[in-house]
Image (spheres, rainbow, N blue to C red):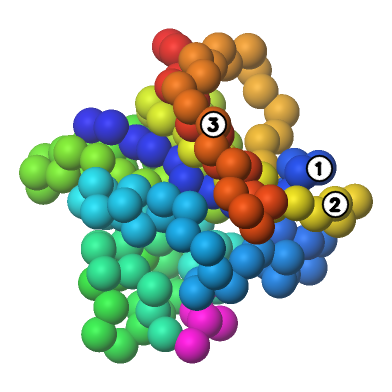
Amino acid sequence: MQASVFIGATVDGFIARANGAIDFLPPNGGEPHGYLEFMDTVDAIVIGRKTFETVLSFPEWPYAKPAIVLTSNPHRLTPPAGADCEIINATPLEVVASLSQRGMAHIYVDGGVTVQRFLAAGLIQRIIVTRVPVLIGEGTPLFGPLAHDIRLEHVETRSYRSGLVRTEYRVHS
């Protein structure tokens, strides 16, 4: 199974403010930067509790694909009405095994801690980071401490009129 990250981060490397806000990200109707094309390639989305709670604040559920929410307390969360959403307590390896058995070939991993856990387990093959032209000084870092270096191979970088810069990497095992 292929697991990919597609995430926005500030130039100083944060994916959310200290309070969890993502108000620095461009609006949904902003300049296209490959997200919709990326979403066409995935079979499911895997997110953590904090990302799930952020997504619940959106006017509508943003995912047309099945979403798996990882949390240590699944009974405390409720999927939104009508959403294809499963809330579970599982390790990244268990998630990949389960989704593979269900015939899924490509997952989108999103959220700081969830991305970090999948990286630590060696399960991410592709990372796409879109840098937002803003510095916020503190917040949730995209990447946390690592047990060892993770080597990346640059695939491509694209810049956009809005100042967004999207860079794609392949992860070397």
Which amino acid, by three-letter code, is at mark 2? Leu
Q: Quadrant of the N terminus?
A: top left
Drawn side of residue 52 relative to residue 92, left or right: right
Q: Is residue 57 covered in magenta?
A: yes
Judge whether residue 99 is colored magenta.
no
Tell us which disc is closer to us: 3 or 2.
3
Residue 77 quadrant: bottom left
* 91 and 96: which is toward the camera: 96
Q: Are marks 3 and 2 in contact (CB under 8 Å)?
A: no
Estimate the x, y position of residue 100 in percent, counting from the top left: 16, 39
Q: Which of the two labelled residues, at mark 1 and mark 3, occupies the earlier sequence position?
A: 1
Q: Residue at x 31, y 52 (%)?
A: 37
Which residue is denoted by mark 2 in the rendering? 135
What span is in magenta? 54-59
Q: CA distance from mark 1 to mark 3?
A: 18 Å
Taking the spot 71% from the left edge, 71% from the top edge, the residue there is 23
Q: Is residue 3 above or below residue 90?
A: above
Amino acid of disc 3: Thr
16 to 28, vertically: above or below: above
Q: Earlier in the sequence, mark 3 or mark 2?
A: 2
The spot of residue 145 in percent (x, y) is: 71, 28
User: Would you call the spot at circle 1 few (<14 residues within 10 Å), some (14-19), or many (20 or more)?
Assistant: some
In the image, residue 13 sits, relative to residue 120, either above or below, namely below
Residue on which disc 3 sits? 157
| Residue carrying label 1 | 12
Residue found at x 77% / y 44%: 11
Q: CA distance from mark 3 to mark 2?
A: 20 Å
Above or below: residue 101 compared with residue 23: above
Determine contact: label 2, label 1, CB under 8 Å: yes
